[in-house]
Image (cartoon, helix red, strand yellow):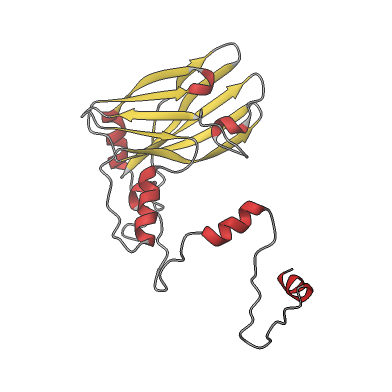
């Protein structure tokens, strides 16, 4: 395009290595802007880091089950329950099961184009007053800070906790399931779990036995220890 314009104006282009056409990627306008404004590449000696130890259960443990099955919300058209709690040496995980009489748009869980911000959130408050909060959309701020710090060459700090976030999940239509992870193990005493879903005007809380969760976590063993 530039060459044709110059030729039309009678301007001669010089050949050789000094002339370099400007390359822009094909595609929509926003993609071309991203190419020009994208963040700088990491340092040449940058080594990608894996997830920190507090971001999930150890790969060498299967955990210890804690008998928990609580219905957090129940109506004619929607049921939300907490099930399948397992404790590990460094924290615990559980499942939030959503069952609906009618299909639920995945955007209300943070999926697909233009997801809503009115997703399910869970706050966990420990007996010592500490609390943490996470949502079904995206990773926790602490985990993103960890990767950002590593990319910038800084030693990632260990957060104070508790860290609350999803470790997987999905579904479709009338059935959705999400796995949540909480780090670290709670101290003895009650653990208050509060689920909120602004899109459905739902807030529900349940009290869990932090002592039982902690005891189960301390019984979880490394599968390869001593092997």
Can see residue 87?
Answer: no
Indicate the position of residue 176 as horizontal and vertical percent values: 58, 31
Q: Residue at x 55, y 36 (%)?
A: 110
Q: Is residue 141 left or right of residue 102?
A: left
Q: Nearer the viewer, residue 188 or 173?
A: 173
Quarter holding the N terminus is: bottom right
Badge count: 0
Query: Which of the 4 image quarters holds residue 126?
Result: top left
Give the residue at the far front of this rendering: 10
**In which quarter of the view is residue 85 placed?**
top left
User: Looking at this rendering, what residue extends furthest in the bottom direction?
Assistant: 16
Q: Nearer the viewer, residue 43 or 147?
A: 43
- Foreground residue among 110 and 100: 110
> Where residue 77 sits in the image (x, y, percent)?
61, 15
Q: Position of residue 4 (x, y in %)?
A: 77, 72
Residue 213 against residue 138 in the figure, above or below: above
Which sits in the foreground, 116 or 173?
A: 116
Q: Can residue 160 be seen in the rendering of this structure?
A: yes
When the figure is inspected, residue 178 is found, relative to residue 70, above or below; the finding is below
Left or right relative to 40: residue 175: right
Q: List x then y, in percent, for residue 90.
A: 31, 44
Q: Quadrant of the C terminus?
A: bottom left
- Tell me which residue sits at (25%, 42%) in the image: 160
Q: Residue at x 48, y 28 (%)?
A: 120
Q: Is residue 123 above or below residue 4?
A: above
In the image, what residue occupies the spot 38% across and 19% down?
205
């Amino acid at each position: 395009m530039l060459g044709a314009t110059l030729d039309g104006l009678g301007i001669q282009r010089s050949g050789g290595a000094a002339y370099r056409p400007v390359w822009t990627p094909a595609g929509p306008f926003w993609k071309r802007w991203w190419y020009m404004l994208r963040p700088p590449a990491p340092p040449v000696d940058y080594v990608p880091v894996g997830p920190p130890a507090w971001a999930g259960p150890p790969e060498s443990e299967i955990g210890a089950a804690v008998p928990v099955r609580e219905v957090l919300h129940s109506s004619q058209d929607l049921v939300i329950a907490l099930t399948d709690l397992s404790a590990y040496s460094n924290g615990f995980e559980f499942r939030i099961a959503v069952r609906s009489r009618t299909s639920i748009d995945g955007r209300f869980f943070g999926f697909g184009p233009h997801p809503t911000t009115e997703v399910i959130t869970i706050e966990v408050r420990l007996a010592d007053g500490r609390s943490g909060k996470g949502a079904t959309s995206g990773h926790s701020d602490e985990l993103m800070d960890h990767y950002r710090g590593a990319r910038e060459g800084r030693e990632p700090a260990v957060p104070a906790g508790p860290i609350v976030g999803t470790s997987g999940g999905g579904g479709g239509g009338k059935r959705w399931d999400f796995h949540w992870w909480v780090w670290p193990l709670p101290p003895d005493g009650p653990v208050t779990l509060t689920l909120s879903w602004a899109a459905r005007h739902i807030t529900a809380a349940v009290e869990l036995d932090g002592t039982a969760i902690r005891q189960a976590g301390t019984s979880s063993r490394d599968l390869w220890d001593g092997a």
